[in-house]
Amino acid sequence: MTTDDEIAGALEAMADLLEAKDVEYKPRAYRRAAENIREHPSSVAALAEDGTDALDEIDGVGDAIAAKIVEYTETGKIEELEELRGELPVEMDALTRVEGVGPKTVGTLYRELGVRTLADLDRAAREEKIREIHGFGPKTEQNILENIEFARSARERELLGDGRPLADAIVKHLADSDPVERVEVAGSIRRWRATIGDVDVLVGAEDHGAVLDAFTDWERVESVIESGENKASVRAGGGVRVDIRVVVDAEFGSALQYFTGSKEHNVDLRNYALDRDIKLNEYGAFDISDVAAPESDQRVGERIGGHTEASMYDALDLPTIPPELREGRGEIEAAAAGELPDLVTEADVRGDIHAHTDWSDGGFTIEEMVGQAAAFGHEYIAVTDHASGPGIFGNTGLDDDELIEQIDAVEAVAADAEVEVLTGVEANIDAEGGLSVSEDVLDALDVIVASPHSALDADIDAATERLTTAMEHPAVDVLGHPHGRLLNQRAGLDLDVTEIAAVAAEQDVALEVNSNPTRLDLWGRPVQTAVEAGAPIAINTDAHSPGEFGNVRYGVHTARRGWAEPSDVVNTWPVEELRGFLH
Ligand code: DGT
Ligand code: CA
Ligand code: CA
Ligand code: ZN
């Protein structure tokens, strides 16, 4: 059952987001109501079960707020709050933990600089972009920078999109450093999990001290948490925790296997090895068939693997299992049976069929987006601006007339473009599964992406029904970010993915892996369900600027976590084949 604390928290979240949008009066009303709820002598949640009238007795709770409280206690969510979160996809709680940063500042920083996370804020401050905003100055910027560190102590997991570029930079820095023989990322980041606890880095070298010095002296290291003989932990690149371990080169492969995880995979693999009289650990693979007391030491018996990671799997007569599959979801059995998937790679992707321009909420013209898609190396690109509807930022969506008008504009650009350009739209799926665009407009466009943006509070049956209804619409080609989740902010829809995947396979609708690092939706397990059901997958960036085309790497590795092969992914297909699918 809902607690009064949760009710008050939801109202305070409304207040913060309304304030960030510069709405007047309402934020104060919501905060006052929240405070009175917390102080109310009896359970407000219990009162709410009798309906809005029962809430009359609480000071500051009028009809509108009472309705929100009842909605929250009945459904666990407030639709308006979900919509506000969609419009302002920022980590409000994390950002406002920084002293001197309130909801208004969060709103401004998001609108001006696209700041969503603490790592974004840290970067913006270090790059001296905040001082350039009207009403801010170097002093404010400096204060923000100083206070971020403290705000981080009570934080959530990092986004892969923040951790991965940092990890790449660390590897590059260390690879150029003299004492380092080999260096690799390990842990969840090597498995490309959507969120990571920390960045794990592994180095093979003789002189461990020299490696750790080269690391802690790196210009992007902000503070050293701890430092020992063979390992160190620091904060770097905007307060992200980085763990580094140094091992002798001969044991680099076994350490890499061990520290890549996941724990579940390692436990399964160790048991698989023990059944074959082989002991596995971070120091190597050991044949213990002639060893009386295999527990007596870490390194016992004959060493049969450990220099390379492949040698560890080879010791078990297994092919090397790609890190993205190492989650304890049947990968060892598949490897043993010679049935590992031939996973999709970044090089397989030929185009992007979900992107936005300044016709809706993107920041760039059709011409700029198309030109940059070509420069990125794509063979095709679809322009899929938002149709108007609830949950669309600042009512920037296009109505039917504007969509028809846009077709001419896209075709004009397409005539001189170096990529194949497809027309399209991202239609909003309403609460009943209907689309916000009329039939003749849908018929006139090449790519119809249908996505949930609002009413993300339905229960699992209603939500599943809503999306299957949308997929059964004959015009729909792609189900965009099916759950509507925003990492670290909202869980999104609860879905019966088995059912969604079955309908997608039957209707020939592609389920999207949205590559935006704040979404990564679908992700590993649901992608695996979709692939098993034979549903097509589309790996899209949903780019609102050309820089976001590069996010496709996150989508590809996420699809790999779902065991996807190139043939499963419609945008690895040649354009004629794709057009056949869209038709
Ligand atoms: P994270 O950081 O929470 O996103 O997840 P991981 O998987 O990176 O976990 P982390 O950083 O705690 O440890 C890195 C890897 O080291 C982990 O994936 C597997 C291995 N490992 C760490 N502790 C243990 C353990 O107690 N048992 C086993 N079997 N493996 C461990
Ligand atoms: Ca980790
Ligand atoms: Ca770690
Ligand atoms: Zn979109």
Image: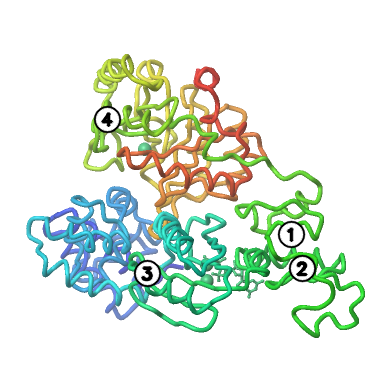
Provide residue 304's location: percent of width, then percent of height: 80, 66
Relative to the observer, which residue lies in front, 24 or 540? 540
User: In what element is the residue under mark 3?
Assistant: loop
| Residue farthest front in this picture | 178
Ligand 1 near label 2 (Cβ, under 8 Å)? no
Query: Mark 1 to mark 4: distance in Å?
Result: 48 Å
Residue 285 is marked as 2
Amino acid type for the residue under numbered disc 4: Glu
Read off the residue under disc 4. 368
Tag 2, which secondary structure?
strand
> Which sits earlier in the primary sequence, circle 1 or circle 4?
1
The mark total stands at: 4
| Element type at mark 4 | helix
Task: For marks 3 and 2, give the one nearer the viewer.
Answer: 3
Task: Measuring from the top left, give residue 114's x and y in whole percent.
Answer: 25, 51
Q: Residue at x 43, y 32 (%)?
A: 352
Task: Say which of marks 1 and 4 sits in front.
Answer: 1
Colour scheme in use: rainbow
Q: CA distance from mark 3 to mark 2?
A: 34 Å
Inter-mark Cα distance, 1 to 2: 8 Å
Near mark 2 (Cα within 10 A), the count class, few <14, some 14-19 or many ≥20, is many
Tell me the mark number nearer the camera, choosing from 4 and 2: 2
Tell me the crowding category of disc 4: few under 14, some 14 to 19, or many 20 or more residues within 10 angstroms, Cα based: some
Q: Is residue 359 above or below residue 275?
A: above
Circle 3 sits on which residue? 218
Picture coordinates of residue 457, whole percent (x, y): 42, 51
- The residue sitting at 41% across, 54% down in the picture is 161
Q: Earlier in the sequence, mark 3 or mark 2?
A: 3
Image quarter of residue 563? top right
Disc with the residue nearer the chain's start (1 vs 2) = 2
